[in-house]
Image (spheres, grey):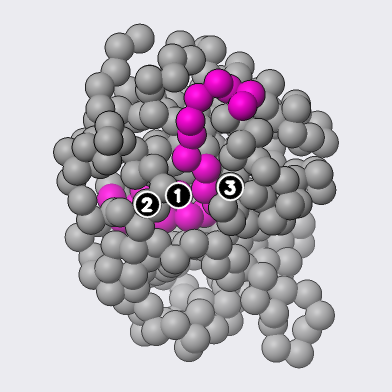
């Protein structure tokens, strides 16, 4: 498969599935079908690497000349995974970026999954051309967050784990989409749980825009209008593809994840230098 400096592969590793596609970085569209395989039971590093290889082989993009970005559900600092959300505890403190680079025989860019979803929405989605502080939240098994200020990503915010005043468990346990399923909540009951979470974020950070992602964002009309906020809140455009698209976008940014304001040509120049 041929590619150019304006295309890259994005791999999104999650607790239940590993997804990937080739992405056109001019507009964030997928140039191939989205390939998805189940996350191996236990999600140990060697098994996850094997699954990622399977996705790349199916996409026919094993050539190391194609830029590759990988999104992972953990705090990522200097290539190490410092937490483990829905994956094996082995990942905590693990040199994950080097592990994938060695195993795949190519350089990659490795980042937190919610962060890259935020990048996708700023570059190509609901937050495109929006100044100020954008806060993306992904509502799923947990609550992922990304903060982007005037095009610069502030990584690893993990604001789903903010503690609820007067309670032992965090907002993620109380208000993630998984809580709606677990407690058999109606949309209005779930939105009543989301209200204090978004109000708390609004109080702490005074954002200019909330973007709500995750698969449930396709039902945004059922719960977002029920929230009473001063801040505009909109559904994400790319939903479950955001991790793939954002990971691919950061693949060309290399070690400069804040480089969201440059053109595709600028990023291509960075990648080839």
Above or below, comparing residue 172 to residue 259 in the picture: below
Instruction: Residue 114 in the image: state x and y as whole percent.
Output: 52, 54
Label number found at residue 79: 3
Label number found at residue 256: 2
Instruction: Residue 4 in the image: state x and y as whole percent.
Output: 25, 22
Query: Which quadrant holds residue 233?
Result: bottom left
The residue labelled by disc 1 is 116
| Residue 250 located left or right of residue 92 | left
Res. 94 visible in picture: yes
User: Which mark sits nearer the N-terminus, 2 or 1?
Assistant: 1
Above or below, comparing residue 99 to residue 188 in the picture: above
- Crowding at dot 2, Cα within 10 Å, few <14 / some 14-19 / many 20+, comes out as some
The residue shown at (35%, 9%) is 1
Q: What secondary structure do most residues of the magenta stretch adopt?
A: helix
The residue stretch that appears in magenta: 102-123
Label number found at residue 142: none
């Amino acid at each position: 498969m041929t590619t150019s400096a304006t295309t890259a592969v994005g791999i999104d590793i999650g607790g239940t599935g590993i997804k990937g596609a080739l992405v056109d970085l001019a507009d964030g569209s997928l140039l191939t079908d989205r390939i998805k395989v189940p996350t191996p039971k236990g999600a140990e590093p060697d098994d996850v690497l094997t699954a990622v290889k399977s996705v790349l082989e199916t996409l026919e993009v094993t050539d190391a000349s194609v830029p590759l970005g990988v999104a992972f559900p953990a705090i990522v600092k200097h290539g190490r995974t410092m937490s483990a959300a829905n994956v094996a505890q082995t990942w905590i403190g693990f040199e994950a970026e080097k592990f994938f680079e060695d195993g795949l025989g190519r350089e990659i860019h490795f980042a937190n999954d919610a962060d890259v979803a935020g990048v996708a929405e700023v570059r190509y989605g609901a937050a495109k051309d929006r100044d100020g502080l954008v806060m993306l939240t992904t509502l799923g098994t947990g609550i992922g967050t990304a903060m982007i200020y005037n095009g610069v990503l502030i990584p690893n915010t993990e604001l789903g784990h903010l503690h609820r005043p007067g309670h032992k468990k965090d907002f993620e346990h109380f208000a993630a989409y998984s809580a709606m399923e677990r407690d058999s909540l109606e949309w209005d009951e779930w939105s009543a749980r989301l209200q204090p979470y978004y109000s708390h974020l609004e109080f702490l950070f005074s954002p200019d825009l909330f973007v709500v992602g995750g698969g449930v964002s396709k039902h945004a009309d059922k719960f977002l209008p029920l929230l009473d906020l001063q801040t505009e809140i909109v559904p994400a455009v790319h939903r479950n593809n955001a991790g793939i698209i954002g990971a691919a976008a950061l693949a060309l940014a290399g070690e400069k994840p804040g480089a969201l304001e440059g053109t595709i040509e600028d990023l291509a120049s960075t990648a080839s230098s």
